[in-house]
Image: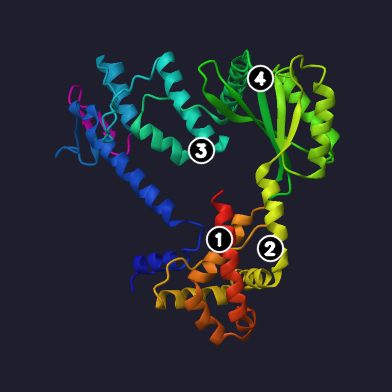
Amino acid sequence: MDEQTFNDQDLYNDASFNYSISQIFSDAQSENVDTQSTSLSLVWEYFDKEPFDAPVHNVCKTCSFKYKLTTGISTLRKHLKDNHQIVVPTRNTRKQTPITEVKPFNQQEQAEHTEYLIRWLICDLQPFTTVDNVYFREFIKHFCPQYTIPRRQQVKDLIMSAFINRRTKIASELQIEGQCSLTADIWTSINQDAYLGITIHYIDSNWNLRNFLLDIIPFTTRHTGENIANEIITILNEFNILDKVIALTTDNESAMVVCGRKLAESLGSQLSLVTFSHYRCAGHILNLGVKQGLELIGDPINKVHELMNKIKNSTLLYNQLCNFCELKNIYNYKPVLDVVTRWNSTYHMLKRLEELKPALVLLAADNDNIKSLYPNEDYWVAIRVNMNFLKKKTSI
């Protein structure tokens, strides 16, 4: 092995010398560009590179002055300018893609496109950070390069401005000649945050029934009737309709009953021709009656609930049920659980039980836990009676 080969091999073996592959390619590309730049420079119209009578030199065609091959292009250009008053322009030797200048939208066009963006963000519940996502910006630029996408803080300000404008418009629309009524309910999110929702109902000047969500209020205080009434009064004052509300409909929860009484006391002096009334939701009252009826034969219903809940919370049992459903050509194989506040959910649970019966028989045969919960013949009779009863109530 000769010395040069040894040195190259030795250098290769020591290649752990912090010299990455990307750097090697970068240097090679840079060297290629420099070589290309040297060979394509306009300077070579005035110099001979390595003529036969002057090897390893660059020779000026005008005065025959010689420069070594290692001399830079800038030095050759300076020679032409200082000695021959020849100014050689520089030019970019890299191949470039022609750039088409895009004229941006004017202020009105920009505002129109931003309005559509804001509307989408609001209606689709998108976060403010969407507009800062690099892929989203590339997507928009591809289809509409004239549009300048606003940043997150700008979007936040625009959405808040749209909210205030919409709220002001609603307050103006509610200045009607007639009266209106409210429905209210408190609900808790999956994060255990409580909110008070208020919906308004009225007839507009064209005799059209209008109803929409007036406000959702984060409820951080105790859920007492007085606190709920105070929050509702605050909203009514904000929309300037305190003297127009003649009724409130809520569920039968005790705090809501107290809230209705407090509102009647507060709004009684505001209404001159009519009195304020608090109504209990007919659906909730009917649900209480149905629940009492179901309690009379509660054991079969409780067994079905326990059965559905066990399958739903077990991955193994659920997968087995799915396999048996496919075997029996059953397509609605997801278990359904009832909800205490809605009697029609009990009907849907029993209806799904009946649909799954062929697959549940096979599942019960393979699992003792399911077999102990599977309804016997007497329970099936009670279940079918309850289904007919609930079906009639659901159609009300």
Query: Which type of secondary structure does the marked residue at label 2 adopt?
Result: helix
Q: Whole-percent x and y of residue 328?
A: 41, 77
The magenta span reads 59-71
Q: CA distance from mark 2 to mark 1?
A: 14 Å
Which residue has dot 4 on it?
Answer: 179
Disc 4 residue type? Gln
Q: Judge whether residue 306 is colored magenta.
A: no
Which residue has dot 2 on it?
Answer: 294
79 relative position to 361: left or right: left
Tell me which label, 3 or 1, sits earlier in the chain. 3
Confirm or deny contact between disc 4 and disc 2 (CB under 8 A): no
Q: CA distance from mark 3 to mark 1?
A: 30 Å
Residue 94 occupies quadrant: top left
Which residue has dot 3 on it?
Answer: 124
Question: Which of these two is toward me, 322 or 340?
Answer: 340
Q: Nearer the viewer, mark 4 or mark 2?
A: 2
Tell me which label, 4 or 2, sits earlier in the chain. 4
**Mark 1 crowdedness (10 Å alpha carbons): few <14, some 14-19, many ≥20:** some
Residue 144 occupies quadrant: top left
Q: CA distance from mark 3 to mark 4?
A: 33 Å
Query: Which type of secondary structure does the marked residue at label 3 adopt?
Result: loop
The residue that appears at 25% across and 17% down in the rendered structure is 86
Query: Which type of secondary structure does the marked residue at label 4 adopt?
Result: loop
Disc 1 residue type? His
Asked whether residue 306 is in view, the answer is yes
Which residue has dot 1 on it?
Answer: 348
Vertical order, 13 against 233 (above or below):
below
Q: Whole-percent x and y of residue 9?
A: 39, 68
